[in-house]
């Protein structure tokens, strides 16, 4: 059901504007480009992430310090992120500065300087970021499991590899950016106390019309199981990966229900079985990533090496029990998810990110249909997840 606080418009320049009206004097603004790591070839994997970094290093009008200063000195935040299907640049400011947020983000996207000096420095920073994720076992296994579920290039890390980042030239990055980052693939999303007509006029004046075309690449699945050893670890790490059962549009909502039941907090089945009853692990978490032509679920536990077999057995057994999912469990999971969404809607920046993600999928209106979509998931939809028998797994254990 569409909210009476939500507005959407496709401008003559090709840009789509999304706006949710709020009364609090804070506004979150973002431009999302419907282009991310999913579209990269194996030789250029990580280039979108590097571009995201570079766009914050200065424009033809403003240097790095000036960009951040114009936002931060007004009490705001400026940041960005790279995903599989989108790259997003966003700000959060007192609502009286909504025009500043939109103008700074547009300058970042439309007028990047791509300074040679900054480019070489930023490549070094990205390499250190890759090293940081590698050295953190929890980050590492969550990144690595995708490699066990999918062939390259999709299975590779969004950040790419050190070798690829080193090989990228400034000319490579500029050409890639100029080819793919076009207005017709962009969304301006504003959540907060603002005026929709003003926002549309501002966006119309700032963004020139530009178009691009690209197709969803082929994504090839696989299922691998590996064990890695590493010096200096005091704890072992287990992560299981499961391909989605292709339930169509209901897929992500069925996965949400399964995850809430399996690992959605201290009252969840896996938390009770693994931590509360048996004391086998401290950290236990589950997540899913569902895109337009891919989808997978992960379940992670950090524990002693000798506990991993039992933990993996319990996880697989509980997933298998989804074949007998009951109405009571479905009702409780629905209530939990709908309630959590209400809590998360307190944050304008979370809603902003969610609206962009939905716009690049089913359409931003789906954000406001979440309750109905969750309620539409049937017992049979969830039970299909319990039929999955193929698991990828990674164990990272002390050497």
Image (spheres, rainbow, N blue to C red):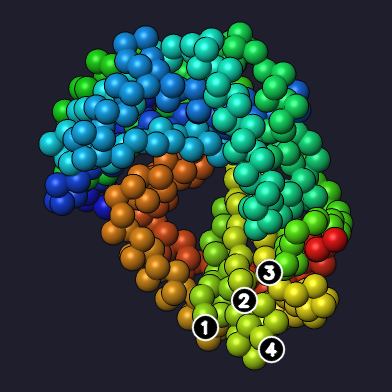
Q: Which residue is mark 4?
A: 278
Q: Residue at x 62, y 44 (%)?
A: 132
The circle on residue 267 is: 1
Q: Is residue 377 visible?
A: yes
Q: Which residue is mark 2?
A: 282
In the image, which is nearer the foreground, mark 1 or mark 4?
4
Location of residue 283 (image quadrant): bottom right
Q: Nearer the viewer, residue 143 or 18?
A: 143
Looking at the image, tell me whether mark 1 or mark 4 is earlier in sequence order. 1
- Tell me whether the residue at label 2 lies in contact with that at label 3, contact meaning CB atoms closer than 8 angstroms: yes
Furthest residue in direction front, as rendered: 232
Q: CA distance from mark 1 to mark 4?
A: 15 Å
Q: Position of residue 109 (x, y in %)?
A: 41, 21
Q: Position of residue 270 (x, y in %)?
A: 64, 79
Is 308 situated above or below 169? below
In this picture, residue 44 sits left or right of residue 62 = right
The image quadrant where one finds the C terminus is: bottom right
Q: Residue at x 27, y 28 (%)?
A: 69
In this picture, residue 79 sits left or right of residue 181 = left
Furthest residue in direction bottom, as rendered: 277
Looking at the image, tell me whether mark 3 or mark 1 is earlier in sequence order. 1
Q: Residue at x 39, y 36 (%)?
A: 79
Q: In what element is the residue under mark 4?
A: loop
Q: CA distance from mark 2 to mark 1?
A: 14 Å
Q: Nearer the viewer, residue 372 or 43?
A: 43
Is 208 situated above or below 137? above
In the image, which is nearer the foreground, mark 2 or mark 1?
2
Q: Which residue is mark 3?
A: 302
């Amino acid at each position: 059901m569409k909210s009476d606080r939500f507005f959407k418009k496709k401008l003559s320049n090709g840009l789509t504007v999304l706006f949710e009206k709020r009364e609090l004097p804070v506004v979150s603004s973002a431009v999302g480009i419907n282009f991310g790591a999913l579209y990269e070839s194996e030789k250029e994997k990580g280039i979108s992430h590097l571009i995201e970094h570079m766009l914050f290093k200065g424009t033809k009008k403003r240097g790095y310090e000036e960009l951040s200063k114009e936002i931060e000195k007004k009490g705001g935040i400026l940041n960005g992120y790279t995903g599989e299907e989108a790259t997003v640049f966003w700000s959060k400011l007192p609502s009286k500065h909504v025009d500043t947020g939109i103008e700074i983000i547009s300058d970042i996207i439309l007028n990047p300087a791509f300074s040679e000096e900054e480019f070489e420095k930023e490549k070094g920073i990205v390499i250190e970021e890759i090293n940081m994720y590698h050295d953190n076992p929890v980050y590492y296994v969550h990144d690595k499991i995708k490699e066990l579920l999918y062939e390259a290039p999709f299975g590779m890390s969004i950040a790419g590899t050190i070798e690829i980042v080193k090989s990228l030239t400034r000319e490579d990055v500029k050409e890639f950016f100029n080819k793919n980052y076009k207005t017709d693939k962009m969304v301006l999303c504003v959540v907060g106390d603002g005026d929709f007509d003003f926002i549309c006029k501002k966006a119309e004046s700032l963004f020139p019309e530009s178009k691009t075309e690209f197709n969803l690449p082929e994504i090839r699945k696989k299922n691998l199981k590996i064990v890695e050893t590493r010096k200096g670890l005091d704890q072992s790490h287990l992560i299981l990966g499961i391909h989605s059962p292709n339930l169509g549009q209901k897929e992500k909502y069925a996965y949400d229900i399964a995850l809430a039941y399996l690992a959605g907090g201290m009252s969840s089945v896996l938390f009770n079985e693994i931590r509360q009853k048996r004391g086998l692990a401290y950290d236990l978490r589950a997540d899913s990533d569902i895109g337009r032509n891919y989808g997978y679920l992960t379940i992670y536990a950090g524990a002693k090496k000798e506990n991993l077999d039992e933990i993996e057995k319990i996880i697989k057994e509980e997933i298998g029990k989804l074949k007998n999912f009951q109405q009571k469990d479905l009702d409780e999971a629905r209530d939990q998810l709908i309630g959590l969404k209400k809590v998360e809607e307190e944050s304008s920046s979370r809603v902003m990110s969610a609206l962009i993600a939905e716009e690049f999928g089913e359409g931003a209106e789906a954000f406001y249909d979440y309750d109905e979509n969750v309620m539409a998931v049937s017992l049979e939809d969830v039970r299909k997840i319990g039929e999955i028998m193929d698991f990828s797994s990674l164990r990272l254990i002390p050497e």
